[in-house]
Image (tube, rainbow, N blue to C red):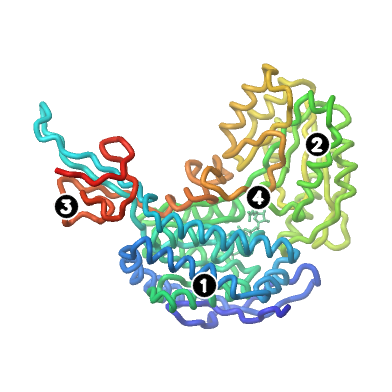
């Protein structure tokens, strides 16, 4: 398999080298510097923003059919990148071949799912309330509304999913599907992977005759470029996956703009797993084994990695520790993440209230750290809010409680999370309902008797949660509903039928499902 060393930016249909400082990605498995890449600056950002602004009205007028064809072509072009995409992604992330093959399937699958959604057209949520001229005391006007494209969207991909949350990942697919141009700030860990995606996009744009400003890739290392992109007046929304620090910085920049814009950021989560007493008595060893595998999976570099285990004092800590010590060690994604992990584990180990059960910060090669488990009492956990902070990597903290009341107290101390998990078969125990109620307040998704790693891509999925898991808990970054983030709703009052957008016209020429006077309907309106 050949690794691509081409590391370009892509602006208005042209591949170019950013004129600023150069940086390079790192192969974490072979501990090697990869090809260097030039950073974009103000001039490149201006060009990308100008092209996106020109493309926005053209894209907003594309039919669902045209956008669907474009997305289908894009998915095919990504597949046509072949093994070079896999080899390049492996070199830039250290992720194994099978994982990246699966991730490519997921990436193309989610693009195709959005294609189907926009082809059907009903996603625009057309809603029509017809006039009642003789209503008393005042006539009721005719009001019709629908979702429409927002304008250029800035997208920031994550280090841990170079494809599915990368330059053409879920946020990009959702924003494009809604009819928006996108400007991607390439992740500095994957410049060559991002360049390959830009090549696929270039082919799709040309073959479907879409405007050249439909997509831009701005490569760069350092926060200035991303901050300037979010501050740019042409940008109308942001999709972000990554750290709390990064997401929060971009939320603050967006809020301080003369025209504030929405930031849809998916950030930190410790994904608590509650093990109820009946499990400790019945099948604790198999749950401990499953949990250990989930902690070590992908070297813990999943946003849904179980970073917190809450249970009663007993053998479970030792059982989990034993299974975790038997798990293979994975590779960290890049030296920055490896060093941050080592530092955070070392800091926790210095805390006298925390007991290290297995692993620790002592691995010779920080790029291949030990899988670690620590233990703390519920009392100390609740007293130390810093223990709510995520450590990105293969580590979990087990909170030992004296009774179920303490388990509930720990749940009450939680911040926002992407997931929370409950292990139990005793569904009639009285403590379960209050625990579930609390966890469903603080987590986007509550799972029973499973492990949080692994996110099904389907319409009912909720991948989000209260801050700091996400910046907008009513939204999801996975599944069809992700499209709604990059839209705005506009209403027309007493507008002549011939001037209405097709989705709102009486004849229903798109044959979509609409809300008609509060009821779902596919019928034409006869007046
Ligand atoms: P990241 O460091 O937040 O970077 C994501 C993207 O945002 C990159 O393109 C980065 O580029 C940019 N960025 C970061 N901070 C910025 C700022 N202040 N202003 C403007 N742009 C900024 O996330 P990551 O690389 O995926 O992961 C690194 C850390 O994120 C980990 O150590 C971990 O603690 C945390 N984390 C990530 C995830 C995830 O799902 N990815 C989940 C949990 C935790 P520049 O650096 O070039 O600005």
Mark 4 closeness class: few <14, some 14–19, many ≥20 residues within 10 Å: many
Q: CA distance from mark 2 to mark 3?
A: 61 Å
The answer to whether mark 2 and mark 3 are in CB contact below 8 A is: no
The answer to whether the residue bearing label 2 lies less than 8 angstroms from the nearest atom of ligand 1 is: no
Q: CA distance from mark 3 to mark 4?
A: 47 Å
Q: Earlier in the sequence, mark 4 or mark 1?
A: 1
Q: CA distance from mark 4 to mark 1?
A: 25 Å
Q: CA distance from mark 1 to mark 3?
A: 42 Å
Residue 527 position (above or below residue 219): above
Which residue is the site of mark 1?
A: 218
Q: In terms of image quadrants, where is residue 17?
A: bottom right
Q: Which of label 1 and label 3 is nearer to you?
A: 3
Q: Which of label 2 and label 4 is nearer to you?
A: 2
The residue at 72%/43% (across/down) is 306
Quarter of the rendered image showing ligand 1:
bottom right
Label 4 element class:
loop
Residue 379: image location, x then y, percent: 75, 27
Which residue is the site of mark 4?
A: 303
The residue at 54%/73% (across/down) is 77
The residue at 33%/71% (across/down) is 54
The answer to whether mark 1 and mark 3 are in CB contact below 8 A is: no
Label 3 element class:
helix
Label 2 element class:
helix
The answer to whether the residue bearing label 4 lies less than 8 angstroms from the nearest atom of ligand 1 is: yes
Which residue is the site of mark 2?
A: 287
Q: Which of label 4 and label 1 is nearer to you?
A: 4
Q: Earlier in the sequence, mark 2 or mark 3?
A: 2
Q: Earlier in the sequence, mark 2 or mark 4?
A: 2
Residue 115 position (above or below residue 88): above
């Amino acid at each position: 398999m050949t690794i691509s060393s081409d590391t370009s930016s892509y602006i208005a249909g042209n591949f170019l080298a950013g004129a600023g400082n150069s940086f390079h990605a790192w192969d974490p498995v072979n501990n090697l510097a990869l090809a260097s890449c030039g950073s974009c600056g103000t001039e490149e950002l201006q060009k990308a923003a100008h092209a996106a602004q020109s493309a926005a009205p053209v894209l907003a007028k594309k039919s669902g059919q045209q956008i669907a064809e474009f997305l289908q072509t894009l998915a095919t072009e990504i597949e046509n990148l072949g093994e070079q995409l896999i080899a390049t992604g492996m070199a830039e992330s250290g992720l194994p071949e099978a994982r990246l093959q699966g991730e490519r399937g997921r990436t193309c699958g989610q693009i195709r799912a959005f294609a189907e959604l926009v082809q059907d057209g009903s996603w625009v949520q057309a809603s029509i309330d017809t006039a009642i001229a003789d209503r008393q005391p005042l006539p009721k006007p005719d009001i019709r509304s629908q979702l429409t494209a927002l304008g250029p969207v800035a997208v920031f991909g994550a280090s841990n999913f170079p494809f599915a949350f990368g330059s053409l990942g879920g946020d990009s697919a959702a924003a494009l599907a809604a009819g928006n141009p996108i400007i991607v700030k390439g992740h500095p860990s994957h410049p060559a992977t991002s360049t390959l995606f830009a090549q696929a996009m270039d082919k799709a744009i040309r073959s479907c005759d879409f405007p050249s400003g439909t997509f831009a890739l701005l490569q760069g290392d350092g926060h200035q470029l991303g901050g300037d992109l979010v501050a740019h007046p042409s940008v109308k929304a942001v999709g972000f996956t990554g750290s709390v620090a990064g997401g929060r910085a971009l939320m603050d920049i967006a809020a301080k703009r003369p025209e504030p814009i929405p930031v849809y950021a998916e950030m930190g989560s410790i994904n608590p797993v509650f093990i109820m007493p009946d499990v400790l008595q019945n099948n604790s060893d198999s749950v401990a084994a499953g949990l250990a595998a989930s902690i070590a999976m992908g070297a813990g570099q999943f946003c849904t990695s179980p970073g917190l285990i809450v249970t009663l004092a007993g053998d479970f800590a030792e059982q989990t520790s034993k299974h975790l010590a038997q798990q293979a060690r994975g590779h960290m994604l890049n030296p920055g993440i490896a060093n941050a992990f080592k530092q955070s584990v070392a800091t926790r180990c210095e805390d006298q209230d925390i007991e290290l059960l297995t692993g620790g910060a002592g691995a010779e090669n920080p790029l291949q750290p030990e899988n670690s488990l620590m233990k703390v009492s519920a009392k100390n956990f609740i007293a130390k809010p810093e223990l709510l902070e995520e450590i990105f990597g293969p580590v979990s903290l087990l909170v030992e409680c004296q009774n179920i009341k303490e388990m509930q107290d720990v749940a009450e101390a939680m911040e926002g999370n992407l997931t929370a998990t409950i292990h139990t078969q005793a569904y009639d125990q009285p403590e379960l309902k209050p625990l579930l109620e609390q966890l469903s307040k603080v987590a986007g998704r509550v799972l029973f008797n499973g492990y949080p790693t692994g996110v099904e891509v389907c319409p009912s999925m909720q991948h989000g949660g209260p801050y700091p898991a996400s910046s907008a808990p009513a939204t999801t970054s996975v599944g069809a509903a992700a499209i709604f983030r990059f839209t705005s709703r506009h209403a027309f009052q007493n507008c002549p039928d011939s001037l209405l957008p097709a989705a709102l016209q009486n004849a229903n020429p798109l044959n979509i499902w609409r809300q008609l006077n509060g009821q779902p309907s596919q019928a034409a309106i006869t007046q």
